Image: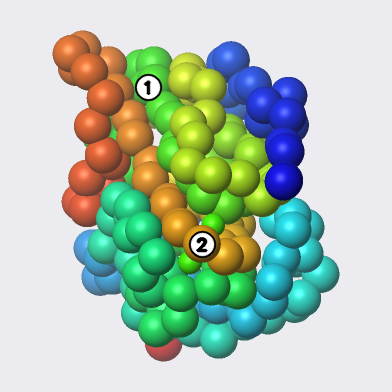
Amino acid sequence: MLCVSPASVRAQAVVGNLAPAAPQPGPDARSSGLAVEYIRLSARHVDDIESAGKGIPGEPLEMLDWNVGDGPVLSHADEDGIGARITGFINFPKAGDYLMAMQSNDGVRLFIGGQLVVEDPGVHADRFSPNVTVQVRQAGWYPLYLLYFERKGTSTLELYWQPPGAGGFDFVPAEAFAHGKKG
Ligand SMILES: [Ca+2]
Ligand SMILES: [Ca+2]
């Protein structure tokens, strides 16, 4: 029986000093959704994805709202043994404090604007990260870098936020994600 202590979830209570994308990607420089590349591996930790090197590009991810049971992992055809390196931009439409949280199965590590926001790097069943307050000083696009893997069984990858003034959590919407246009 695999047992992962919740202590392995790094509780980032507050994250600040995010570096905005420079230059900001204009409408002509970005495509919708996040870019993803896949690596076939039976990972036990998100570090295994980095050690495996570059992957094969997959269909971009419009949102991070994946809760697929035993089904295919993200936009990949396979159901198990997948690592993903997800890159692009997230748009914060106004300055202020955003509460953010992820639910994942298995491991995740999320950077926004160069800052570590969520880290739950090992094998585990569905579970939420602690809520993180992300302090956004200026509205705009910020680089997003996310490592994720599904080892076996069920898989989940969800990103939630509560923007300043909002009454509760919701999925980060599709219009808040983009990736650089090729060429
Ligand atoms: Ca699976
Ligand atoms: Ca799993």
Identity, as a three-letter code, of the amino acid under mark 2:
Gly
Disc 2 is placed on an element classified as: loop
Asked if residue 65 shows in the view, the reply is yes
User: Residue 177 in the image: x percent, y percent?
Assistant: 31, 54
Q: Is residue 131 above or below residue 103?
A: above
Residue 98 marker: 1
Dot 2 beta carbon under 8 Å from ligand 2: yes
Depicted 42 relative to depicted 54: above or below: above
Q: What residue is rendered at 64% in x and 38% in y?
A: 119
The x and y percentages for residue 161 are 33, 30
Residue at the spot of label 2? 153
Residue at image coords 57%, 16%: 14
Farthest residue toward the front?
Answer: 1
Residue 165 shown left or right of residue 21 in the figure? left
- Please tell me how many numbered marks the rendered image carries: 2
Circle nearer the viewer, 2 or 1: 2
Q: Residue furthest right?
A: 51
Left or right placement of residue 28 versus residue 143 in this view: left
Q: Amino acid at mark 1?
A: Tyr
| The quarter of the displayed image where residue 165 is located | top left
Q: Residues within 10 Å of mark 2 (few under 14, many from 20)?
A: some
Earlier-in-chain disc, 2 versus 1 = 1
